[in-house]
Amino acid sequence: MTATLHRLDTRRPPSLEPMMQLVAADMNMVNAVILERMQSEIPLIPELAGHLIAGGGKRMRPMLTLASAKLIGYSGARHHRLAAAVEFIHTATLLHDDVVDGSDLRRGKRTANIIWGNPASVLVGDFLFSRSFELMVDDGSLRVLKILSNASAVIAEGEVNQLTAIRRIDLAEDRYLAIIGAKTAALFAAACRVAAVVAERSDDEEAALDAYGRNLGIAFQLVDDAIDYVSDAGTMGKDAGDDFREGKVTLPVILAHARGSAEDRKFWKDAVEGRRAGEADFAHAIDLVRNTRSVDDTLARARHYGQRAIDALGPFASGKAKDAMVEAVEFAVARAY
Amino acid sequence: MTATLHRLDTRRPPSLEPMMQLVAADMNMVNAVILERMQSEIPLIPELAGHLIAGGGKRMRPMLTLASAKLIGYSGARHHRLAAAVEFIHTATLLHDDVVDGSDLRRGKRTANIIWGNPASVLVGDFLFSRSFELMVDDGSLRVLKILSNASAVIAEGEVNQLTAIRRIDLAEDRYLAIIGAKTAALFAAACRVAAVVAERSDDEEAALDAYGRNLGIAFQLVDDAIDYVSDAGTMGKDAGDDFREGKVTLPVILAHARGSAEDRKFWKDAVEGRRAGEADFAHAIDLVRNTRSVDDTLARARHYGQRAIDALGPFASGKAKDAMVEAVEFAVARAY
């Protein structure tokens, strides 16, 4: 097996479209649940939550719950509520992330913490988090509650792990992978897995969907990290150089630092410690990641996890759902080209 | 019925001691669960969480779960885990509260946000919150999960409600009571109620314990608010004037403002808007609350809720547990004298 992904359709670039079409009707139901359950007598709550929830996100995680349910032929409606719960956990995480990072832009819009302040973002995040558990309790599956409460704890652990690694150029690749495995991939995995739970499928199928989501999540994050060092990124609203200017230690940086000369290492150390955040510095950084093939190899790592995600779907029957889920992986890893 | 509380023992002032003795053995088990479940591979998590959890709190809420279980003769061990879950929710709330308020001292110690920064406090709060749900899931009662997830959402709503009311002198007493009912009393109520759930007692007994906790919680908070305007407060580590200097609109302020002259109202408006935070201002504020009997009447309100808490225990059999729970209320309302 090579690192090249098997393309189902070579006539057009891979896209999320098939998955979005696959789940469109279900997603309307999920959106209705989200809208209903983000309400509160306190007007600031739906106002702030709505800013982010209605703010042009891809709904990637609930989409994965819905697509996974399609894949295994689930015909009930329980997954709508759980997909909403997953999106609430994700939204709560984003609100707190933006406070933690002091971010001022997300998806091209001003962040909630800039508009309403850090206190409101922290508290509305807490509210959405609580609401996500209320949604799960309404569903009534202890197994789902276990999966998603564990995912939430793992996400928070991953965030703290990242926080203690901040601006540290000596971050090892293994620890970096542990961080994104917790921060990003754990919720992708749980989002897929809960579909198998509500459909009462075997442990093996649960584990397969978990593996699909987890590997896709890692691939997704690695490509995000690579895109930051692709200067002509016309990709999903992310601007090149954001991570660099914030001194974030991502895989392209880890590789370029490990592979660089003493002088290069000095540059990277200065950069992640905040002493190299100018345009010329970023141009130099791009040269360094290019010369060390660090972006290429970050993308190769992403393809590795993408391939594992696709292979995890092996046990499931072919069909539109599986095709869409495979193409979603191909889309995820192709975004940087 | 008068507002005077029936004293069980007039020879000594009311105390939390009997309740602490009642639950001492159980509390050791709860502390073991807390210690075990706040662990993480990420060292900052137990370090930061331990600062607050080991930091001299009264464990009031888990103590209520344990005392309630004693009251109804529960002989199992499930409530240890749930009492720990309640304490985790409370601790998460405190961590986020201190970030929201920018507090630098709690229980006489530097706050976690001052020592480790706001990001760490937000994220470790999220972790403890997730862990509390994991504890509940381990217990396995959907009813407990419903009660505590709802309480968590109500707490967050109350916090946002308070945030939008901040520095507003025109806060009405009703809205103020709604805020403390959500912020403080909801978790007191839930902490007591879950004991009836694990003991599989009737809905009436569940509701009675809920009412005990809720009314005690309101009384507790009102006395806390009153203490801030009692200049010789040698009471539970709270310094007089903290609320005043932060411009917090509490019941003594609401009453003094409502009852004051035009000039007094101007003073209170200036004070809550942050233009009157000096020592002379605080001395004047104490004069005003004294002249309008605002502290006395805040305490009278507290006794009203305290009496309701005691009366809610009516259906339960007499004995050491009930005596201790009654005395805890008497202690709560007597703290300001």
Image (cartoon, coloured by chain):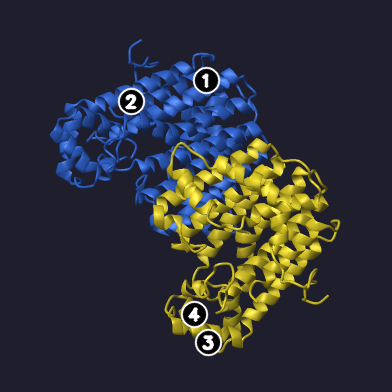
Chain colours: A blue, B yellow
A293 lies left or right of A222 = left
Query: What residue is drawn where x is 38% and y is 56%?
Result: A114
The residue carrying mark 1 is A208
How far apart are the alpha carbons under marks 1 and 2? 23 Å
Depth check, front residue: A6 or B309: B309
Q: Is residue A84 above or below residue B90?
A: above
Numbered mark located on residue B264 in the image: 3
Is residue B117 visible in this depiction of the protein? no
Q: Amino acid at mark 1?
A: Ala
Q: Chain of mark 3?
A: B
Mark 3 and mark 4 on one chain: yes
Q: Is residue B24 above or below residue B14?
A: above
Numbered mark located on residue A49 in the image: none
The first of marks 1 and 2 along the sequence is 1
Q: Chain of mark 4?
A: B
How far apart are the alpha carbons under marks 1 and 4? 62 Å
Crowd band around label 1 with a 10 angstrom C-alpha radius: few (<14), some (14–19), many (20+): many
Q: Are marks 1 and 3 in contact (CB under 8 Å)?
A: no
SS at mark 2? helix
Q: Are marks 1 and 2 in contact (CB under 8 Å)?
A: no
Q: Chain of mark 1?
A: A
Give the tally of numbered discs. 4
Q: Amino acid at mark 2?
A: Ala
Query: What residue is drawn where x is 62% and y is 67%?
Result: B221
Q: Chain of mark 2?
A: A
Q: Amino acid at mark 4?
A: Lys
SS at mark 1? helix
SS at mark 3? helix
The residue carrying mark 2 is A334
Q: Where the N terminus of chain B falls, by quadrant? A: bottom right
